[in-house]
């Protein structure tokens, strides 16, 4: 959602093209993506996800722009996002291994975060 309206349109199109083969999680993303399209149409800007600034599961307003939550990233569930937020309260992560150790997140979550 932070990559512009064209990417959002493409994501919606890709999910719809899958038809019945789309996963429930993908189908659940369509309303969120549609809201993103509406926000772009209203000239509301998105800030990028930020390991230290994003909330675990709520969108935040910052200077008239919207910062998405960590759990809005595919592959990062609410539980993992909350664990990251709790762990970051004890200071910056010095490495990926430090983040994994302190938050208890899985390799799949790390890979999802690295894709941002």
Image (spheres, grey):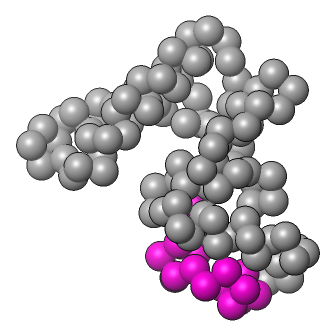
Which residue occupies 72% across, 65% down?
85
Please tell me whether the stretch drawn in magenta is mainly helix, strand or loop: helix
Number of numbered discs present? 0
Which residue occupies 70% across, 24% down?
45
Q: Position of residue 40 (x, y in %)?
A: 59, 17
**Magenta stretch containing residue 111, yes or no?**
yes
Which residue occupies 55% across, 36% down?
1
Quadrant in which residue 61 is drawn: top right
Q: Position of residue 47 (x, y in %)?
A: 73, 37
User: Can you name the residue that lies furthest to the top here?
Assistant: 42
Q: Nearer the viewer, residue 91 or 110?
A: 91
Which residue occupies 58% across, 29% down?
4
The residue range painted magenta reads: 97-116
Q: Nearer the viewer, residue 57 or 7?
A: 57
115 vs 97, left or right, is left
20 vs 56, left or right, is left
Where, quadrant-wise, is the C terminus in this rendering? bottom right
Q: Is residue 101 above or below residue 82?
A: below
113 vs 95, left or right, is left
Quadrant in which residue 60 is drawn: top right
Question: Is residue 6 at all visible to an observer of this figure?
Answer: no
**Magenta stretch containing residue 78, yes or no?**
no
User: Can you name the residue that lies furthest to the right here?
Assistant: 91
Q: Is residue 80 above or below residue 43?
A: below
């Amino acid at each position: 959602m932070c990559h512009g309206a064209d990417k959002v349109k493409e994501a919606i199109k890709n999910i719809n093209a899958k038809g019945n083969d789309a996963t429930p999680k993908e189908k659940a993303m369509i309303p969120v993506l549609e809201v993103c399209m509406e926000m772009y149409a209203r000239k509301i800007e998105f800030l990028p996800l930020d390991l230290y600034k994003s909330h675990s599961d709520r969108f935040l307003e910052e200077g008239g722009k919207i910062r998405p939550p960590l759990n809005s990233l595919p592959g990062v569930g609410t539980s993992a996002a909350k664990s990251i937020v709790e762990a970051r309260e004890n200071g910056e992560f010095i490495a990926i291994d430090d983040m994994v150790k302190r938050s208890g997140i899985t390799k799949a979550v790390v890979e999802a975060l690295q894709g941002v």
